[in-house]
Amino acid sequence: MTHFHFHDPYQPLDSPVHRLDPRVKLVLALGFILTATLLPAGAWLSYALMGAAAWIGAHLSGLGIRRVLRRSMLALPFVLAALPVVFTAPGPSWLTFPLGPWLVSVRGEGVIRFLSVLLKSWLSLQIAVILVGTTAFPDLLMAMRAIGVPRFLVMTFGLMWRYLFLLVDEAIRMLRAREARSVAPEIPGRRVGGTLAWRARVTGRMVGTLFLRTLERGERIYMAMVARGYDGEVRMLSMPSLSYRDLAPLIGGLLFLLGALLLGWMF
Amino acid sequence: MHIPDGFLSPSVALPLWGVSAGVSGYALRRVSRELTERETPIIGVVAAGIFAAQMLNFPIAGGTSGHLIGTALATLLFGPWVAILILTCVLSIQALVFQDGGLIALGANIFNMGILGALVAYAVDQTLRGLFGGRRGARSAAAFLAGWAAVVMGALATGLELALSGLVPAHVVLPAMGGIHALIGAVEGLITMSAVAFLATVRRELVAERPVAGRVPLWIAGLAMTLILTLLAPIASSDPDGLERVAKDLGFLQAARRSPLSLLPDYAIPGLPNPALATILAGILGALLVFGLVMALWLGRRARRSEKASR
């Protein structure tokens, strides 16, 4: 079961990063990831600067560098998809060795591109981990609305978040019920039960059941909302204005990112 | 299939962000116009349900297991626009909170799994049920193929984006992604098919209310098919197929090249200097031809049916 890391990543601590306005944090995180995307391959100095900034952020936030590093490893298996570039990039080869019937050569340009992709994606992941670790979801919703995400979408995100863990629990209960009713193989990996199509059909019915329960729950939720005065309008609290305490990190952070970007393109 | 940040070059990721934002915004306007206020809050709950349904897995072989993505199921139950909206929500939350896919790559991920998946699933379902009517077998086959095609086309798009970013050559990544996802897509298809069959038994109105729609959605279907074949065109061009191999071996390829009858020789349009652009244009032209053929078939069937009905 691969996707079982579904718990709220928010860590309710008190730190300078937690106290920062969520709008500032969201804009800075998006700016950071955009900068990482825009940097050319092989801009090692900029990568190092941004990595230092991410680690300072991780330390200041109280999440700790170790926790941020551990969570940022989750998406790294995708790096395998970038591995072929080591062998296929243009340019002179560093090292040639036989692999079965083929001659494989490691190319310098390819190694640079591969490492760059690795670092860029790792930097982006760390900043995303810090963002959701220090910002509660309702604050993220407020920040999203402030940067222009449509109101209806923000409301849908909110509803989704409210019922997400409930429905995930429902799914886990269904899986447990199926397991309780099934025999387990004595030798691990040995097939038990019906054919593949049969197993897929059982799962399809579970999906259908979960879906029906979701739909019926949605209808009940709607009734409850109407009973409390919902009329189809989305109303939200007005947002507080940004204070100077928040503006300084915003401007400073954006200038830093701009600097890292210029540095990466010039050297 | 969730692409993390850092893998796509800005010239691929940023335009796709724009495309996805535009299409999702259009879907948002359409859905909020068409749905009654009753249904709007339900979208959020259903999005959470799709998220949860992705956890329902089953063992395949050797420790691997398959699970649902859900684009096709959402499309078959709610139509493509609602499905695009639901998948936009699911993928956004996965990227923002769970780091499943990147934030700058979010546009590409929404495009591959949400927009393309929904349009492909819709096109396949509409075409098959339009051709073969509302029989049970046709409905099941349509659901299976819709699930399969949504996954495979999404995977091809992912591969193409990685190739365009200069990361992996197209002739490596496209067959690899397509091959693996042809199997993953079969799992998606089987689950989608049995979920639809189950829902048709217990809540008939959910499935039975899906009519085969009229012209504008068909145009969307055509667009989706165009996209499909456009994506397939580079494979066809980079990997010479059997016939061409034979022709080359026998030495009459040179003659064939000069033939005035071959409209689009080797998927390249004369007068266009850029081979990639020419390949894509040729793919679109070819797709339009295929689409026209399917459309003619469908219209013919409909005319015959209405003739029968009037008699």
Image (spheres, coloured by chain):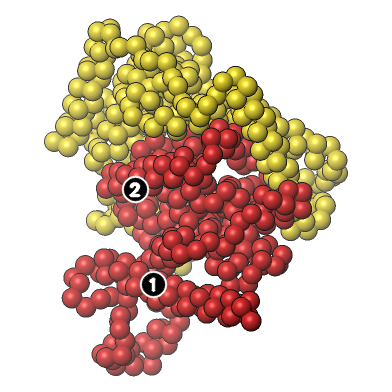
Chain colours: A yellow, B red
Q: Where does label 2 land, which residue?
A: B19
**Quarter occupied by the N terminus of chain A:** top right
Which quarter of the picture shows residue A92?
bottom left
Q: In this view, does A176 lie to the left or right of B124?
A: right
- The residue drawn where x is 69% and y is 45% is A207
With respect to residue A36, does B144 lie above or below?
A: below
> Nearest the camera: B257 or B21?
B21
Distance between the Cα atoms at labels 2 and 1? 22 Å
Sooner in the amino-acid sequence: mark 2 or mark 1: 2
Q: Which amino acid does label 2 sit on?
A: Val
Q: In this view, does B112 lie to the left or right of B192?
A: left
* Dot 2 crowding, Cα within 10 Å, few <14, some 14–19, many 20+: some
* Dot 1 crowding, Cα within 10 Å, few <14, some 14–19, many 20+: some
**Any mark on residue B288, and which?**
1
Q: Position of residue B114 (x, y in %)?
A: 48, 48
> Nearest the camera: B32 or B101?
B32
